[in-house]
Image (spheres, rainbow, N blue to C red):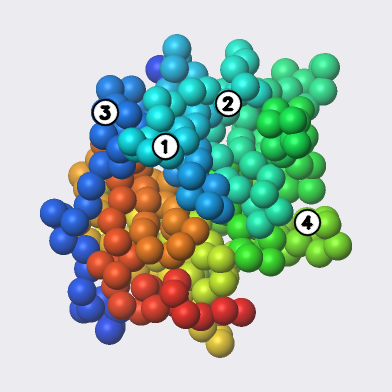
Amino acid sequence: MIRLFFLSFLIVTTARVCAQPHAEKVQSFAPGIISGDSLEFNAAFSTDGKSFYFTRSVNKRSQLYYSVYLKDGWSIPAPLSFSNTNYSDADPALSPAGELYFISTRPTHSNDTTKDYDIWKVKLLSSGQWSQPVHVKELNSPEDEYYISFTRKGDACFASSRKGGYGEEDIYFSEYQNNIFLEPRNMGSTINTSQSEYDPFITANGAALIFTSSGRRGSLGKADLYWSVKTTNGWREPDHFNEAINTSSRDYCPYISPDNKYIFYSSGGDIKYTRIDSLPAILANCIATRSY
């Protein structure tokens, strides 16, 4: 599976002609502090914007880190306490309820030896400590799950290599009702192809989706970022970001900041960002104004 191979490798129309980002507007995030000499990817801010969560490759495995914004800038990152294990963790994402979700190869029970990636969650306790990780069984399958994101209502979007999809990895959606995730459903052949689609970021209003695909139409490299907006007839045919964002390497892990002002993504071993208003106008407007 392409996403699994990539994680393992890390460890060892109007929309088509409207303005897109200029290369000089794309920057590395907190260079020398967060984007450094190691391999960093993912981005997730706390609601107040003062804590930043990401993944760093350490000792041939991926581990979750955080940094806090202080008077003089971002603090030196430290590993999250629950992520300091012999297993690989990645893809941090905060739910509307404030729980921190992530993927991990940690076992789900004492006899589990599969080493596949599943979705887990923790919460920050009143003591300032993190709770014990909880396996989110409603979303997981016997195969790999990756990269979860949420709407404002708590509905989840994530990728999985479970059986019955269109390609190696597909993007799935699960509604959140009465504190339970409903049966995940495949997002269909407009979003998913016979190739590999993963790392989906659904906007808080549910109006737009940004994701990674390998081998899709228009690809510039090993994996590129694409976007789609929701219409009354479903999801629009995805568009490809131009060369300002997509490169000849791998571009992945999109994320919109809580204030809807910046898009973050990972590329070239660093975490990058640019302003939302430099994106295609249809996409930027959907992020800023629409709700479902």
Q: Quadrant of residue 166?
A: bottom right
Seen in the image, is 178 located left or right of residue 175?
A: right
The relative height of residue 85 versus residue 261 in the rendered view (above or below) is above
Name the residue furthest bottom: 232
Q: CA distance from mark 3 to mark 4?
A: 39 Å
Q: Which residue is mark 2?
A: 80
Instruction: State the SS at label 1.
Output: strand
Q: Going from the N terminus, do you reach mark 2 or mark 4 first? A: 2
Q: Which residue is mark 1?
A: 70
Q: Nearer the viewer, residue 258 or 137?
A: 258
In what quadrant of the picture does the C terminus appear? bottom right
Q: Position of residue 254 (x, y in %)?
A: 42, 52
Residue type, label 4: Phe
Q: CA distance from mark 2 to mark 4?
A: 26 Å
Q: Position of residue 191 (x, y in %)?
A: 49, 65
Q: Nearer the viewer, mark 4 or mark 1?
A: 1
The label on residue 266 is none
Q: Going from the N terminus, do you reach mark 3 or mark 4 first? A: 3
Q: CA distance from mark 3 to mark 2?
A: 20 Å
Residue type, label 2: Leu
Residue type, label 1: Leu
The relative height of residue 15 versus residue 84 in the rendered view (above or below) is below
Q: Going from the N terminus, do you reach mark 3 or mark 1 first? A: 3
Q: Which residue is mark 3?
A: 32
Give yes or no for contact between labels 3 and 1 (Cβ–Cβ under 8 Å).
Answer: no
